[in-house]
Image (cartoon, rainbow, N blue to C red):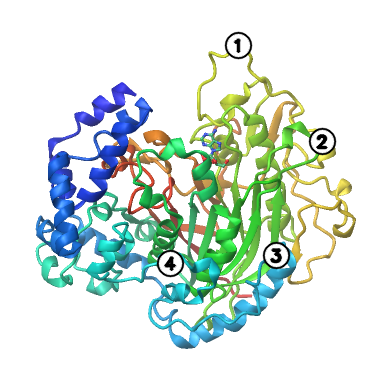
Amino acid sequence: MIASCLCYLLLPAARLCRALSRALSDAFFTCRKNALLAKSSSPQVEGDFAMAPQGLDQEECEGLLQQWREEGSSQVFSTVSEGPLVDKGLAQSSLALLMDYPGEQDAASEDKWCSRQLSDLQAAENLEEPSPAVLGEESLPEGEGPMWAAVPMQAGPQYADCTILPMGALAAEEWEEDPAVVAWSLAPEPMPQEEAPIWSFEGLGQLQPPSIEIPYHEILWREWEDFSTQLDAQGLEAGDGPQFQFTLMSYNILAQDLMQQSSELYLHCHPDILNWNYRFANLMQEFQHWDPDILCLQEVQEDHYWEQLEPSLRMMGFTCFYKRRTGCKTDGCAVCYKPTRFRLLCASPVEYFRPGLELLNRDNVGLVLLLQPLVPEGLGQVSVAPLCVANTHILYNPRRGDVKLAQMAILLAEVDKVARLSDGSHCPIILCGDLNSVPESPLYNFIRDGELQYDGMPAWKVSGQEDFSHQLYQRKLQAPLWPSALGITDGCQYVTSCHPKRSERPAGWAESVLEEDMSEPEPEPEPVSPRTVGTIQHCLHLTSVYTHFLPQHCRPEVTTMPLGIGTTVDYIFFSAESCENGNRTDHRLYQDGTLKLLGRLSLLSEEILWAANGLPNPFCSSDHLCLLASFGMEVTAP
Ligand code: KL2
């Protein structure tokens, strides 16, 4: 810890100077955070975050705050925003690359969404616990202006104290009343690609409306990495022939209840930025900003889902599915997709809890959807394979790698079932979520390599989160990892013969909802072999969108920052074809298969997040970063 802090102190002076100039405009949060840090009883928190607030003493802060109150924040900000906007050009061009689907948001297609969504939601109604008057009946106000800004107009009692702010400029009075402004409303607006001034930074001052500068989106700027041109160069035909392209986001949004239960993890945050209404508005802005076609969320609190997230996401054109954790946990996973881009074939909530089984006595869940890509009409008579999307939040407990592996095995078995085609092969798969395991850990390697020799492995080793090697008692993994009664083979497939028909399944079993008739006999699973005692396998060929390393910074990527320690636990895995190299003991090599990775939103390093006072901060409203990737699927003649 001390070494990390020293390392941070020695970061190049240039970054500190830049951060110093930003600190002025961040005076309010800085001030309050310093005060909080001074009170903090946790030396870890103090050590890690002490560097973030730069250069202002208490008096200066109070002076600036006073000025803010007297003059309105915009004036305060405009006086400190004159520095060179170094990253702006990159910002603009990166955003522009995401604007792949012009015309989707026109009025005609909105109409189409509505009817489509209704029928999908009616399907959803059968799937989950009945929701409090959210599905189907009630009429939502037609949004004029930004789609989700209309949400507060629904103001039933549940919205009474909701301080959702509209997109765009905020009036000075609003700033005075609520300094916890929605930071995303100040982020640069996406621009069409041709207008993006990628060639020069100088002219940007004029191109921009007189903007209020908040430093966070500069510090935390995330590059869009475009691989489509590289694929072209390698002859991997990303651009050849028609493709179905889509973007997918995976995001642990930090359930409010969990945050309050572990409040000691958030002492570095200004209380206002931890307020759910602030975070909700900010998260919505982030969804809207990146505008994914598929959104996989973790730590979605049930009341927030039904009362705020689902209605707002629906207004943004999403159809949403939710699976709450079992037991008394109040959060769960959601998968949302644009019905303009996909048609639902199947939705399968997955519970990992098995009564009476100690290995599976935890309340984590997953959610698997099978989606049929809808090819644009202009492409004529062509077809695309269905896409299987699995989202999960695996157990946190760093000691219980055994539980994590068993949870993953259940998810893989469900994915195998949902994604299996009539010839025994699998359609393209995306498996994403918060796996509470680090890169190159046994659990991670199991997903990537399709095999894990676990026998004798200490349970804490599985996730790589923490080192418990010093502990006297260490739970060891022993074969078999799970009892045969679970009905899952060590190849992570359901034992078809033990598989009760849906109607015979015990109460509480995760029920599949089939929109189309998929009840024909299930094809035999592709055999996974050879079987070795003490080894588990799976036959889905998966590889990670992210490489877990930032070459330009020579630093590891970070997806979350508990107590200032950056780590990767969130992933987007996708189907990639393996290139057999003749030696099965080597790591398999992968190339993109029917799913081509076209781009991704770069992650950040721990050091960069320190400069923004860690996570959450006024700009990023979760303790995780979102993951975002763009894929292409081959379109074939039928
Ligand atoms: O690491 V997480 O945060 O993916 O962001 O997943 C879990 C943890 C989440 C759901 O269980 O709650 C957090 N110490 C710190 N964080 C915890 C703990 C704990 N003991 N238990 C749960 N969480």
Disc 3 marks a residue whose amino acid type is: Cys
Q: Which of marks 4 and 2 is nearer the N terminus?
A: 4
Disc 1 marks a residue whose amino acid type is: Leu
Disc 2 is placed on an element classified as loop
Q: Which of marks 3 and 1 is nearer the N terminus?
A: 3
Q: Which of marks 4 and 1 is nearer the N terminus?
A: 4
Q: From the image, tell me which residue sits under label 3.
A: 346
The N terminus, quarter of image: top left
Q: From the image, tell me which residue sits under label 4.
A: 291
Give whichever of 62, 220 is nearer the camera: 62
Ligand 1 within 8 Å of disc 1? The answer is no
Instruction: In the rendered structure, find residue 472 and report the number of the disc placed on it.
Output: 1
Instruction: In the rendered structure, find residue 526 and report the number of the disc placed on it.
Output: none
Name the spot of residue 295 as percent of width and height, x first: 52, 61
Instruction: In the rendered structure, find residue 356 and report the number of the disc placed on it.
Output: 2
Disc 2 marks a residue whose amino acid type is: Gly
Disc 4 marks a residue whose amino acid type is: Asp
